[in-house]
C-alpha cells in the first residue's frame, strides 16, 4: 500500500513539474551543446577537469528527464574535432569520461530501454574509450526506447567533407549520377542517416554559436540559448526549453 502511494505521489509530482508543456508536442529529437564546464570550475576556484566531472553527472539527469517526457532522440555534443587543441591533460580527462559514465550507467540505460549511439570518428579515440562506447552500443543495439546519441570526436565540416567524398566515389563508379544528388542523398551519407533532424537545439553557457555542430541537420531546428552553465543545467531547464519550443510556429520557409 505504501509503495503504491509513493508511486502515485511521484506521478503527481512529475505532472506538476511538467505542467508548462504539452506532452503531445514534445520535440522528438533534442540536440544539446553542453558548454560551460570550464567556466563553472573557474568560478568556484577549481581546476577545469572538476567542471567536466560535474557536467558528466548532469547527463544522467537529463537523459532520464528526456526519456520521461517522451523525447525519442537525445544528441549530446561530448567532444569535438577541435577539442584536441586543448591541453593534453584536459583532453585525456575528457576522453576518460565516456568510459566512466557508461561503466556506471550502462545497467540503468539497458533497464530503461535506452539505445546508445555514436556519431564521430571513433578510430582516433583512445582504446579505452573505444571499448566502452563499442560495448555500450553492442549491449543496447536491440533497445527500442530513447536513442542516446553521443557526438564524440565529431565535427560537422569533417562529416560533410566525408559525405561529399563518398557521393563522389559513387558518381565516379557509375552507381549514381550527378542528377541523382539531392538533399535526401546528402542526408543519407551523413553520420545521422538513421536519425531525424533535431527539432530543438539547446546550448548552455550563454554562447550564441553552433561550434561546427550538425550544420546541415539543424537547418530548420528551433534554437534555445541559456546563460546557465552546463553543470548547473537541470531538468526544469529542459522543461523550460521545451515550453519555449512549443510556443513557436515551425513554418519551414512557408507561411
Image: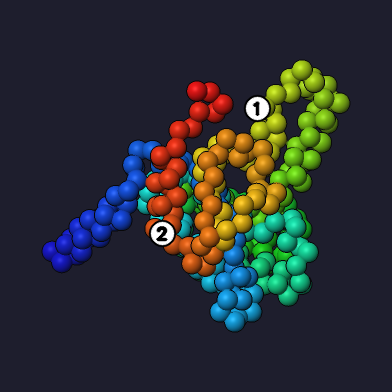
Residue drawn at point x = 86 percent, y = 26 percent: 172
Q: Position of residue 12 (x, y in %)?
A: 22, 56
Q: Position of residue 153 (x, y in %)?
A: 70, 56
Q: Residue furthest bottom?
A: 45
Residue tagged 2? 235
Q: Position of residue 38 (x, y in %)?
A: 63, 70
Observer-nearest of 159 and 20: 20
Residue tagged 1? 184
The N terminus lies in which quarter of the figure? bottom left
Question: Judging from the image, what secondary structure is the residue with disc 1 in?
Answer: helix
Q: Position of residue 108 (x, y in %)?
A: 44, 61
Residue 83 lies left or right of residue 71; in this view the side is right
Residue drawn at point x = 77 percent, y = 17 percent: 179
Residue 239 lies left or right of residue 177; in this view the side is left
Question: Judging from the image, what secondary structure is the residue with disc 2 in?
Answer: helix
Q: Quadrant of residue 194?
A: top right
Badge nearest the viewer, 2 or 1 = 2
Residue 14 lies left or right of residue 216; in this view the side is left
User: Callout 2 environment at 10 Å: few (<14), some (14 to 19), or many (20+)?
Assistant: some
Amino acid at each position: 500500500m505504501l509503495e503504491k502511494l509513493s508511486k502515485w505521489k511521484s506521478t503527481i509530482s512529475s505532472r506538476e513539474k511538467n505542467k508548462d508543456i504539452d506532452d503531445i508536442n514534445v520535440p522528438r529529437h533534442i540536440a544539446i551543446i553542453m558548454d560551460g564546464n570550464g567556466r563553472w570550475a573557474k568560478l568556484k576556484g577549481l581546476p577545469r577537469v572538476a567542471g567536466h566531472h560535474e557536467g558528466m553527472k548532469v547527463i544522467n539527469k537529463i537523459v532520464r528527464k528526456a526519456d520521461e517526457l517522451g523525447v525519442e532522440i537525445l544528441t549530446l555534443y561530448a567532444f569535438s574535432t577541435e577539442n584536441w587543441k586543448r591541453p593534453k591533460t584536459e583532453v585525456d580527462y575528457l576522453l576518460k569520461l565516456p568510459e566512466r559514465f557508461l561503466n556506471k550507467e550502462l545497467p540503468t540505460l539497458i533497464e530503461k530501454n535506452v539505445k546508445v549511439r555514436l556519431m564521430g570518428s571513433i578510430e582516433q579515440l583512445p582504446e579505452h574509450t573505444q571499448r566502452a562506447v563499442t560495448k555500450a552500443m553492442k549491449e543496447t543495439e536491440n533497445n527500442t526506447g530513447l536513442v542516446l546519441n553521443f557526438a564524440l570526436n565529431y565535427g560537422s565540416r569533417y562529416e560533410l567533407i566525408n559525405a561529399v567524398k563518398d557521393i563522389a566515389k559513387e558518381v565516379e563508379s557509375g552507381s549514381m549520377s550527378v542528377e541523382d544528388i539531392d538533399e535526401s542523398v546528402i542526408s543519407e551519407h551523413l553520420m545521422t542517416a538513421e536519425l531525424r533532424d533535431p527539432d530543438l537545439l539547446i546550448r548552455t553557457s550563454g554562447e550564441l554559436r553552433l561550434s561546427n555542430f550538425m550544420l546541415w541537420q539543424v537547418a530548420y531546428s528551433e534554437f534555445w540559448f541559456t546563460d546557465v552553465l552546463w553543470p548547473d543545467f537541470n531538468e526544469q531547464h529542459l522543461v523550460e526549453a521545451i515550453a519555449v519550443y512549443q510556443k513557436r510556429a515551425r513554418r519551414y520557409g512557408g507561411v
